[in-house]
Amino acid sequence: MAVDEIPVLDLGPLRAGEPGALERLGAELRRAFTEVGFYFVRNHGVPEELIDEVFEAARQFHAQPLEAKLAMRFNEHNMGYMPMRGSTTRMNALGTIYKPNANEAVFLKRELPEDHPDVVNGVRFRARNRWPENLPGFRETALRYMDAMEALGKSLLPIYATALGLPPDWFDEAFREPMYTLRLTHYPQQDPATAEEEWSLAPHVDTSFMTILAQNKVPGLSVCLPDGTWLDAPAPEGTFLINGGMLLRRWTNDRFLATPHRVSNRSGRERYAIPFFMDCSFNHVMEAIPTCVDADNPPRYPPTTYSEFMTTYQRINYGEALAEAAKAKQDGAQQVELQGA
C-alpha cells in the first residue's frame, strides 16, 4: 500500500465467513490507520438504491423554504437544522481559523421513544428527532439508512479490534448502543476566487470514532496525507469512505491517525453529502486501549465519555447556531407572552 493512495478493504470474504479474512482485514486496516487515516470498503452489503434515496432526501430537505427548515432549528442536543454559515471550525482546526463554513446541514440521531428515560429527563444528546412536516418518506428513508449504517459500523468493530491486537469482541460492550449522527449537508456552488478564504468545510479532523461517508458524484473532498500533501479523494464505485477522528486517535493513544480533510465545492453544481458519525455508547468511559500503552508510551489523555467530549466540541464549534437558536426560542416565548397578555 502506497501512502499516496487510499486503500480499499474488501468485506466480501469476511461476510462470507472465509477463514483468515478477519486477520487479513485487520492487518490492512492497521496499515491504513498508521499510514493514511482513511480507507474504502467494498462489498459492504448496503443497497445502492438506499444510498441514492438518502442523497435525494438531502436535496429535498434543503430545497425547502428557509422558514420550513428553521422549524427544526439546531439545538443543544446537536440535532436539527443548522443554517448556512452556522458553524466555524475551531476545536478541530489545523491551526488557522477560517470564516464560518459555507454549508447548511440537518443533524439526526437515534430515534428514541417519547417515554425513554433519557428523553424524559432531558439528557443532552439524547433527545427526540424533529422531522420535516411536508416531505413524505423523509423520516422512513433516514431511519432505514441510519439502521444500515449502524449495522455496517458494528460489523467493522472486530476488524478494528484485530488491528489493535485485541480479541474480536473487545469493542462489543463499548458499542452496545452506539451514539451516532447522520448529517445531511448542502454545499452551494462557490466562487473559485474566494474558496480558500471561505471553505465549504474548512480543513479539520472529525471528532468521531468512525465516520462512514457514501460516495459523492460531485467532487470536492480532499484529504491531507501525513507528509502534508493534499489528495483529492477518489470515489471508487460502490464503496464507502471511512475515517477516524479525535476520539479514535485519543482512544488508541495516538496510535491511529485522525487525518485532516476539507471540502471546497468548485464543481459548478450543488453538492450534497451524507456522512454518518458513529461513537461508543453514551456513558462508556474511553481510556487508552491496553495494547496502545506501555512503559515507554503511557496514556496521553485523561479518560472521557462521549457526552463530556461533545459538550465541549459543540460549544466551541457550533456557538453561532446555538446562539441563534437560543434567541429564536426567547423571541418565541416573548411573542407567546404578548399574545396571552
Image (cartoon, rainbow, N blue to C red):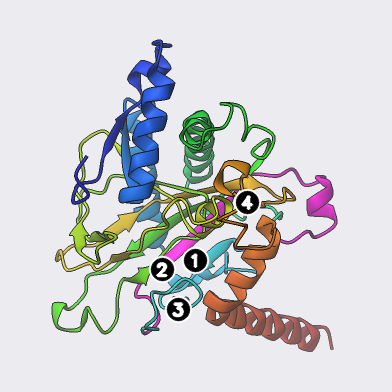
- Cα distance, mark 2 to mark 3? 12 Å
Provide residue 241's location: percent of width, then percent of height: 33, 44
**Dot 1: what SS?**
helix
Residue 121 within the magenta-colored segment of the rendering: yes
Tags 1 and 2 in contact by the CB under 8 Å rule?
yes
Where's the C terminus, which quadrant?
bottom right
Query: Under tag 2, what secondary structure?
Result: strand
Residue 336: image x %, image y %? 76, 81
Disc with the residue nearer the chain's start (4 vs 3) = 3
* Count of picture labels: 4
Which residue position is annotated with label 4? Answer: 288
Main secondary structure found in the magenta portion = loop
Would you say residue 103 sits in the magenta stretch?
yes
Mark pair 1, 3: CA separation: 20 Å
Q: Amino acid at mark 1?
A: Lys
For the record, the magenta segment spans 99-124
> Upstream in the sequence, badge 1 or badge 3?
1
Q: Which residue is mark 1?
A: 69
| Residue position marked by numbered label 2 in the rendering | 104
Give the mark nearer the N terminus: 4 vs 1: 1
Marks 4 and 1, how far apart at CA: 41 Å
Q: Residues within 10 Å of mark 3 (few under 14, many from 20)?
A: many
Q: Residue furthest front?
A: 295
Residue 72 in which image quadrant = bottom right
